[in-house]
Image (spheres, rainbow, N blue to C red):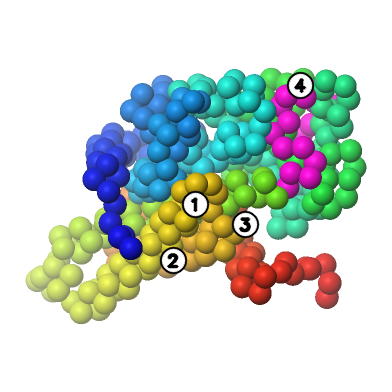
Amino acid sequence: MDFRLTDQQVELQQAARRFAQEQLKPLAKKLEEKAEPVPHDWVKRYAELGFLGINVSTDYGGLGLGNLEALVVVEEFAKISSAVAFPVFESCVGPARAIEHFAPESLRRRIMPRVCSGDAVIAIGMSEPDAGSALTDLKTSAAIQGDKVVINGSKRWCSGGGHADGYVVYCRFDGVPGAKGIGAVLVEKGAKGLSYGPQEQLMGFRGVPSSDLYFDNVEVPLENVVAPGGGFKQLMEAFDLERCGNATMALGQASGALEDVLAYVQERKQFGRPIVEFQAVQIKLAEMKMRVEAARLLIHRAARNAEEGMPSVIDSSLAKCFSNEIAREVTGAAVQLMGGYGYSREYPMERRLRDSWGWGIAGGAIDIQKVNIAAAMVGRRFDQRRS
């Protein structure tokens, strides 16, 4: 068992690192200050350099590489900020991959090349006011009427809301209760009856737009059905990959924090010598390094085990849960080690701390991942509706 990246993977990682470190820091600062998403011209640059659709089939305009290669790039971008990494995340591990794997061929051919070229961003609409962790309680309805699907309802906490070019919307088909009725439909920007709530003002994730979605008799072609009612299991398999992406975004906050604080403690002097000379600092650095490396190994294992498909629930939940937790710990320790500089908005460390808390909420809260892990361990799902 070889834990090293291949030469090709290292080359891709280094290319992503050079671009991110040399080009994206001023952009990350601007997006944070203005709470704006990555501009279209920058997304196009990502595409031209091969950073979008890394693990998407070449048949649809991607590079045709594996999930691990995609996650390696996501981490390098996320070290700079969640906002600058978000287009890479969405194209490689987001809802676009559900389209690639499960949608009709006509929809794949129409959407995926645009995602890989940077001409379309696809977001996801899952959560509702009464359906977050209890996703099977969702009420947004999809009624098939001839060659169209009519959608009614609302979605909460949609990352990309009001900005994306399309939304993979989880719906209940024809009123069928429980998981058996749930599928997904692509609703494209500009659809009649689609509207948005105001942009959310969040603790972190500035530069990642978020809003509610409202569907009032929205009609889309039947070919826009990504997965019909009863396709919930398939959709959640795709979401297991998104969990790995979430884990990597969290890891990027931690590994970026560690790199920055390692440089800082060797430069910062107190009592006449660099603070790295103090044993308390050395111990803290070692603890941070252990957490970062362990999280990365869990993520890479999940990606490796899914080379021919999607990660398993237990692999993805372990990776997400652990990465979410250590990101909060590592960024918090980095802020403490940097003192006032860590707490100042002039530097990226406090932003990493705020974003780290967000990744432990988005995509399934930390405690829900632990429930998933326990369920996989005993081989059955737990009924949370029973006391």
Badge 2: few (under 14), some or many (20 or more) residues near its Cα, within 10 Å?
many
Position of residue 165 relative to residue 365, above or below, is: above
Q: Magenta stretch: dominant SS?
A: strand
Amino acid type of the residue tagged 1 in the rendering: Ala
Residue of label 1: 306
- Eyeballing the image, is 215 above or below 364? above
Residue at screen point 74% across, 44% down: 231
User: Counting other residues with Cα less than 10 Å from the Cα at mark 1, is it few (<14), some (14-19), or many (20 or more)?
Assistant: some
Among the two numbered marks 1 and 3 on one chain, the one whose residue lies closer to the N terminus: 1
- According to the image, label 3 marks what residue? 364
Q: Are marks 1 and 3 in contact (CB under 8 Å)?
A: no
Q: Are marks 1 and 4 in contact (CB under 8 Å)?
A: no
What is the three-letter code of the residue carrying label 4?
Answer: Pro
> Reading the chain from its start, which is encountered first: label 3 or label 2?
2
Q: Name which quarter of the figure residue 220 lies in.
A: top right
Q: CA distance from mark 3 to mark 2?
A: 16 Å
**Residue at left offset 49%, top offset 61%:** 319
The region drawn magenta spans: 211-232
Q: Which mark is residue 326?
A: 2
Query: Residue 221 got which mark?
Result: 4
